[in-house]
Image: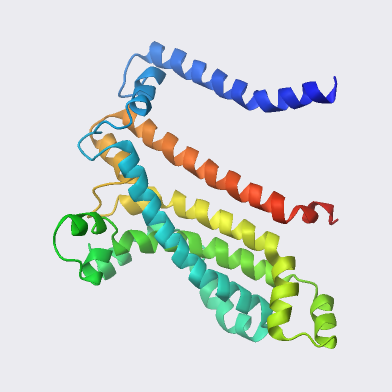
Amino acid sequence: MNSKMKKIIRLISPSVVLLLFIIFWEVVARQVGNNAVLPKVTTVAAHFINFNEEIIGIGTLPKNIIYSLVRVFIGYILAIIVGLPLGILMGYSQRVNRILNLTISVFRPVPAIAWRPLVLGWFGTMSIATISGVPYGPTYAIVDNFKLSMIFLIFLGAFFPIWGATLFGVSNVRQVLIESSQVLGASNKDIFRYVLSPAAGPNIVNGLKNGLIAAWSCLVAAEMLPGSMSGLGYLISHAYELTRMDIVIVGIICIGSIGALFDMIFTKISDKYFSWQKLVK
């Protein structure tokens, strides 16, 4: 088999597997014959074809996707702002690591969903609109969708992968590289820019990827909190209450597809900027 044929098979094989899965799903759904148990593929596909139509009274599918994406990116950016510098600092300074590592590690195994009771007690239904003093009106109605409790849960989900990967990457940079740079007169700024960043870069990017996927995974738990009236997570939970399993599957497909897109983007970034890592044995 020549290389061209292998390349064609490699390209089409994922589509074949997906097509077989869809056929199997449709056959089983027709045998079950109950939308409340397993809806047909055509029933689910109709929601994507008519994606601008209102869904169970909570807006269109694109509108709910946008609300979810904004929530996730707010929490994710906050996690980067806190987790990335903290991971670099703890990875570079053993003294700081000894002081902070135990405290942070105690909270690391706790799943974000376990914080829900505390988060509700702390923030209630406060939103960005509440704390920013946005006047009542159309703008307030939009900004009020971004509750502090949701953002905090998403922040927690993203923080630990980002912090942990950054700490691991920086702390595992070979000491001889740092010492050699210091002997040659490099400042701490130079060491960070020309030694630590390139050497720890693959781990940091991997942490950013895992942090974004973790934040996206926390979406359902975050959007099930009181005060939520939009988003893919709320769409799934509300559809379940109405026994609309076709819409539940629509939400699951959207969450899975967007998460896979995030993974693909970061993989492309790693392949482009850190391809040299594959050559390191």
The answer to whether one can see residue 258 in this image is yes
Q: Position of residue 65 (x, y in %)?
A: 36, 43
Q: Horizontal placement of 257 versus 16: left or right?
A: left
Is residue 272 shown above or below 125? above
Res. 38 visible in picture: no
Rendering colour mode = rainbow
Quadrant assignment for the N terminus = top right
- Foreground residue among 265 and 138: 138
Residue most extreme to the left: 136
The residue shown at (30%, 32%) is 52
Q: Estimate the x, y position of residue 255 in percent, counting from the top left.
A: 44, 41
Q: Residue 77, how many percent across, how many down?
A: 46, 63
Q: Is residue 160 above or below residue 145?
A: below
Depicted 102 relative to depicted 207: above or below: below
As drawn, is 221 to the left or to the right of 81?
left
Q: Along the line of sight, which residue is nearer the eye, 151 or 28? A: 151
| Point 60% across, 59% down: residue | 207
- Identify the residue shown where x is 34% and y is 20%: 43
Q: Quadrant of the C terminus?
A: bottom right
Count of residue discs: 0
Asked if residue 178 lies left or right of residue 59, the reply is right
In front of the other: 220 or 56: 56
